[in-house]
Amino acid sequence: MSDAKTFFLDEEEIPFEEGQTIIQAALSAGKYIPHLCYHPEFKPHGSCKLCTVRIDSRTVTTEDGQSVKIPGRAAASCTTPAQAGQHVESEVPEIQDLRRTLIQMLLVEGNHYCPSCEKSGKCLLQGLAYDLGVMDPHFPQYFSKREVDASHPDVLLDFNRCILCELCVRASAEVDKKNVFAISGRGHTKHLICNSESGELGDTNLAATDKAANVCPVGVILHKRHGFEVPYGQRRFDKAPISDNPAQYAPVKEQV
Amino acid sequence: MNAPLPKRKLKVATTSLAGCFGCHMSFLDIDERILDLVELVEFDRSPITDIKHCSPDCDLGIIEGGVCNAENVHVLHEFRKNCKILIAMGACAINGGLPAQRNSLDIRDILAAVYAQPGRGVHIPNDPEIPLLLNEVHPLHEVVKIDYFLPGCPPSGDAIWKFLTDLLAGRTPTLGFGLIHYD
Ligand code: SF4
Ligand code: SF4
Ligand code: FES
């Protein structure tokens, strides 16, 4: 007899294997949970919090007969192991509102001018924002002053759009075994750095074919001499919402 | 909750601040539906009418472009004062858009680079008729309260139509997949 275990995601029963996180089990079952810093091939990072879910909320009846919902614990579904019988809420208004706020904060914190960004149409941040119906920035624009590094012959870095997900850091360390990228600083000074004496990408051993050069979910790590190749209307998120096909959740591989 | 709408035609004012006029052009992309629209609304201050100042009783103000100079600030305040509902239309109105890409640069350096370099002129124009530039380009909601945001660069004619028909019918405007775009 199989000892398949299940939990409930928005009331739907989801099977999981021991050791799987909530997001892993959900995505394997074809259920999408919004996420930015999670990638199936790397260690979970748990930094963006887009994948936050509520676990085991309870409804209690008060003395005067009213039903009151006691919210369960909020947790990042990419770092929280699935457990048999737990009830997980994801696509509920309260959580979706929090996710919208996170997206708005990310958008105003960097300089996200989508019309001039080569990632537009296939950017996970943008795709998520569309899916969540983000119509406004809500917060004042931060207008952070960030650099562009064009020193590498094949790869361009536009730090304006970095969301500090560390996918490139993890790809470089775990897959390419090169440690080209790291994150430095704290708070609003936190930023991506390149591992070379000059600090420039051109002086690292990054190759355009490296995993790290092809994993950025937003428009930071871009390939030179490739831009706006897919016409408006035919790009990934022109054709289908990000939540449509959970099997395709990984960042789009850049053409090299 | 939305208040019931008056039976008279709604007065709509539109303007372009620091924008490229693309949102207004896209507005015209609602094509023949504009005939349905003029059954419901009359245009007040707008490039369509060439009226220079808003009437004090406008219902909707639709603004394209961000705020990059002193005149933009005045126009925006006039719209806020005279329109019950203000809509920020397009990327520039919403986050400064492409004009705001100058915000990381020093305004004096920009002006010098454009007007006062060999081959490009000798001095920065300073005629009093020219509105003073602000140090930074700002989205509208940083200057006045904005009621609704209609993203896109520009929003498509279909997005504008969906947005306005929602609003005119008393619904909170939503765009949904295919119509919501930031580019
Ligand atoms: S990275 Fe994404 S959200 Fe940012 S400007 Fe590019 S397309 Fe827009
Ligand atoms: S460069 Fe891209 S992949 Fe790397 S941390 Fe920034 S957003 Fe993430
Ligand atoms: S995907 Fe889980 S915290 Fe980013």
Image (spheres, coloured by chain):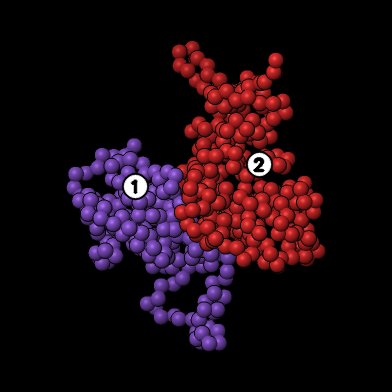
Chain colours: A red, B purple
C-alpha span from label 2 to label 1: 35 Å
Give x and y (percent) for residue A116.
52, 62
User: Label 2 belongs to which residue?
Assistant: A38
Q: Is residue A115 visible?
A: yes
The secondary element bearing badge 1 is classed as helix
The chain containing the residue under callout 1 comes to: B
Residue A192 showing in the rendered view: no
Which three-letter amino acid code belongs to the residue tagged 2? Tyr
Mark 1 residue's CB less than 8 Å from ligand 1: no
- Give the vertical position of A62 relative to B140 (above or below): above
- What amino acid type is highlighted by mark number 1? Lys
Residue in the picture at 36% in, 41% down: B172
Query: SS for tag 2?
Result: loop
The relative height of residue B72 versus residue A44 in the rendered view (above or below) is below
Seen at 26% across and 53% down, the residue is B33
What x and y, as percent, mark residue A55?
60, 26
Tell me: A251 left or right of B62.
right
Q: Is mark 2 within 8 Å of ligand 3?
A: yes
Q: What number is the disc on residue B162?
A: 1
> Which residue appears farthest toward the front when viewing the image?
A1
Q: Residue, x 28% and y 62% (percent of image)?
A: B46
* Residue B116 drawn above or below residue A108: below
The subunit letter for the residue under badge 2 reads: A
